[in-house]
Image (cartoon, rainbow, N blue to C red):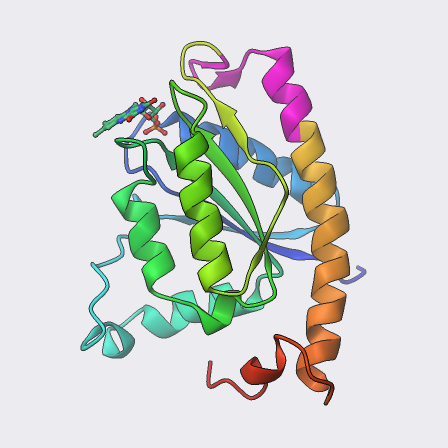
């Protein structure tokens, strides 16, 4: 079997059992897998992640495993509900755990919101910028009971946005992953120069 052209880590940022975020993240993950990507899904409902503590987190059992999964990823798909106009605590907690590991990677974001999730998207972009990651130039936002009902995507408009996201995550993810690898292995200046040899 040929090597997958891209590795994607999909992160579910809702702990709710019947989460619509989970439904959509899984649907996108399936589509990326069918398109030849290697997929890893991180869901804190199945794999609880303790609150980030800079004094203790790095020595906790399980930290190195999750770090390895982040390091392996070329594209990070982030799905979160809109909580008070912001990302969920579960998602923020995950993001707090890493930064070097995100540098030069592509974030693709999905937001469950009743209000288009624009402020949530902005917050995810801020995190990406602080960690030297790229984002797609748009996010996909959707509304429960309108776009997703009983575990199924029911609106054509959401389906079209997801088609676009699946395509762009693959195409731009691959371009950026190739350049990231070259820059990390190279000697030229550039924003990734400072990440060469980062202890991951
Ligand atoms: C604590 C809390 C705060 C919320 N705040 C907002 C909000 O500010 N704006 C909004 O549009 N929806 C808000 N919601 C609604 C959720 O974003 C919405 O129900 C979402 O679909 C939940 O996603 P999930 O099913 O994946 O958990 C809030 C829900 C909760 C539980």
- For residue 82, side relative to residue 133 (left or right): left
Residue 190 placement: quadrant: bottom right
- For residue 112, side relative to residue 198 (left or right): left
Give above or below for 70 relative to 153.
Answer: below
Residue 160 placement: quadrant: top right
Residue 194 placement: quadrant: bottom right
Q: Could you say which is closer to the camera, residue 52 or residue 40?
A: 52
Q: Could you say which is closer to the camera, residue 39 or residue 130?
A: 130
Q: Is residue 153 magenta?
A: yes
Instruction: Give the quadrant of ligand 1.
Output: top left
Name the residue: 43% across, 55% down: 127
The answer, for residue 4, to whether it is visible in the render is no
Name the residue: 66% across, 36% down: 165
Residue furthest to the right in view is 2
Give above or below for 122 relative to 98.
Answer: above
| Residue 24, horizontal then vertical, whole percent | 50, 29
Give above or below for 137 relative to 107.
Answer: above
| Residue 107, horizontal then vertical, whole percent | 56, 51
Name the residue: 45% across, 31% down: 118
| Residue 116, horizontal then vertical, whole percent | 45, 23
- For residue 26, side relative to residue 62 (left or right): right
Q: How many marks?
A: 0
| Residue 130, horizontal then vertical, whole percent | 45, 62
The magenta region covers: 147-162
Q: Is residue 113 magenta?
A: no
Q: Could you say which is closer to the camera, residue 137 or residue 53?
A: 137
| Quarter occupied by the N terminus | bottom right
Give above or below for 3 relative to 19.
Answer: below
The answer, for residue 48, to whether it is visible in the render is yes
């Amino acid at each position: 079997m040929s090597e997958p052209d891209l590795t994607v880590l999909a992160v579910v940022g809702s702990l709710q059992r019947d989460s619509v975020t989970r439904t959509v993240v899984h649907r996108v993950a399936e589509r990326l897998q069918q398109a030849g990507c290697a997929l890893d899904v991180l869901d804190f409902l199945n794999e609880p992640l303790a609150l980030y503590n800079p004094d203790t987190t790095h020595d906790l059992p399980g930290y190195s495993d999750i770090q390895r999964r982040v390091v392996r990823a070329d594209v990070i798909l982030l799905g979160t509900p809109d909580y008070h106009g912001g990302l969920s605590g579960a998602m923020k907690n995950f993001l707090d755990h890493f930064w070097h590991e995100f540098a030069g990677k592509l974030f693709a974001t999905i937001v469950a919101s009743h209000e288009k999730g624009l402020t949530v998207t902005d917050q995810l972009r801020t995190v990406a910028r602080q960690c030297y990651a790229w984002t797609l130039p748009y996010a996909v936002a959707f509304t429960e009971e309108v776009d997703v009902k009983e575990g199924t995507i029911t609106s054509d408009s959401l389906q079209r946005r997801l088609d676009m996201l699946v395509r762009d995550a693959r195409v731009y993810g691959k371009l950026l992953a190739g350049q990231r690898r070259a820059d990390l292995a190279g000697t030229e200046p550039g924003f990734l120069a400072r990440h060469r040899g980062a202890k991951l």
